[in-house]
Amino acid sequence: MDQVRRHRPEKIDGKYWMYWLGTASDGTIRWASRPRRSAPLVRRNTNSRSARRPGQFDSRVVEPGPPPVITPDGIVLIYNGADDHLVYRTGVAVFDRHDPRKLLSRSTSPIFAPEKSWEKTGQVRTLVFVEGMIPVPDAPHAASQQFLFYYGAADKYIGVARSALQSLLPGPIASAQAQSQPQIDYHQHLLMPTDKSPQGFLASDLIQLLDDAHIRRALVLSMAIVMATPINRPSPTNTPRQSRKTIGSAKQVSQYSDRLRGFCGVDPLKSYALAEIDRCSRDPIPLRLKMHFGNSDVNLDNPDDVASLRKVFQSAAAHHMAIVVHIHASITSHRPYGAKEAQIFLTQVLPPHPAPTSRSPFRRCRRIRRPRTDDALARFHPRLQDHDPT
């Protein structure tokens, strides 16, 4: 059985089940689950649940929406509710997949509400009413988790909305998922469209992947750092090309400024580095700084390289820019990297009195199983353990 989503009728415990809205003899509105053993529907073995909740968005009306779907988290039922002022909104309830009568969780706030003018004005004011949902057939990843929700608006129009179903789950179920999912992706890149790759990989594509993975935010690192490799730097200044890469990325990030954080990329050994840092600090979209010592072939045993790095870090600190740095030296060039180089970085490169907003670039360390890498990380460990802001 497909464990992700099912829209066709499916047996649970040997029976077909349905949810419906009814009015009890005492006048209260209730929903119920009922097994269907054979054609006609019978009322035996029904289980009703009080559906209206005083003071909430579904205090007056509760009606099932699209057919429920079976997920690993339970049976997800999208429903529509109205408050005492007859403002119609949408909620979600999750039932036990092994016992459809058992309610696991339910929205405490609506997942969908009338916002557009045509959702507020029509035959019925302030109304959205979801009645259909289908899987998105062309989602690039985890297509079965993405749905199109078809809804009526003000009893006059038809609209469609798109969302990952799991992102709508309420209460303890959503909380449990949130605890098991990272909140931030610390390493993402965007690719601007080119003749060879006209589609590219833009901010909207990244947001889609983040939604699929239930990750809220991401750091977007400029692809200018790739140009810092020796093979891509035939001249001592690549400022125009570097800037174009960063500007293109920044414009994309600005479309989702509440979820994406942009980083400009520089080769700290090049003459343009300080000017580019200054330009990035004045960008309308706040940018941070990303460096890649391996790509730039930084040699921490070279005093000239250390002097250049020190100037770059001092400039970033003066502009209050957070820094992310890939500190591992070039493997291709066989540059040394271990405890000695880590100590040089900590004592000779980092500013002695960093700006209050600067943060250690080592909050997240990717573990590479090499003895020298472990030796280097051992140098950083006391700083991290003591929450040293440098």
Image (cartoon, rainbow, N blue to C red):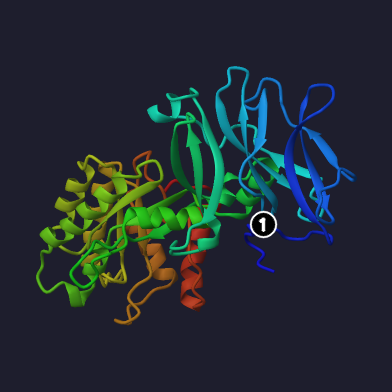
Query: Residue most toward the top?
Result: 85
**Closer to us: 204 or 77:** 77
Q: Is residue 253 above or below residue 114?
A: below
Q: Is residue 6 above or below residue 148?
A: below
Q: Relative to 140, is 254 on the left or the right? A: left
Around disc 1, counting alpha carbons within 10 Å, would you say few (fewer than 14), some (14 to 19), or many (20 or more)? some
**Closer to us: 105 or 97:** 97
Q: For the residue marked with disc 1, what is the amino acid? A: Thr
Q: Relative to 337, is 382 on the left or the right? A: right
SS category of the residue bearing label 1: strand
- Which quadrant holds residue 83? top right
**Closer to us: 382 or 283:** 283
Query: Residue at horizontal 85%, vertical 56%?
Result: 37
**Label 1 sits on residue:** 71
- In percent of width and height, residue 35 lies at 82, 51
Q: Quadrant of the N terminus?
A: bottom right
Query: Residue at horizontal 27%, vertical 48%?
Result: 316
Is residue 353 visible to the viewer in this orientation of the structure? no
- In percent of width and height, residue 106 lies at 69, 38
Query: Residue at horizontal 66%, vertical 27%?
Result: 61
Query: Residue most toward the front?
Result: 40
Q: Relative to 182, is 320 on the left or the right? A: left
Is residue 17 visible to the viewer in this orientation of the structure? yes
Q: Relative to 37, is 367 on the left or the right? A: left
Query: Residue at horizontal 28%, vertical 52%?
Result: 313
- In percent of width and height, residue 20 lies at 73, 40
**Closer to us: 97 or 266:** 97
Q: How many marks?
A: 1
Query: Residue most toward the right?
Result: 44
- In percent of width and height, residue 11 lies at 77, 60
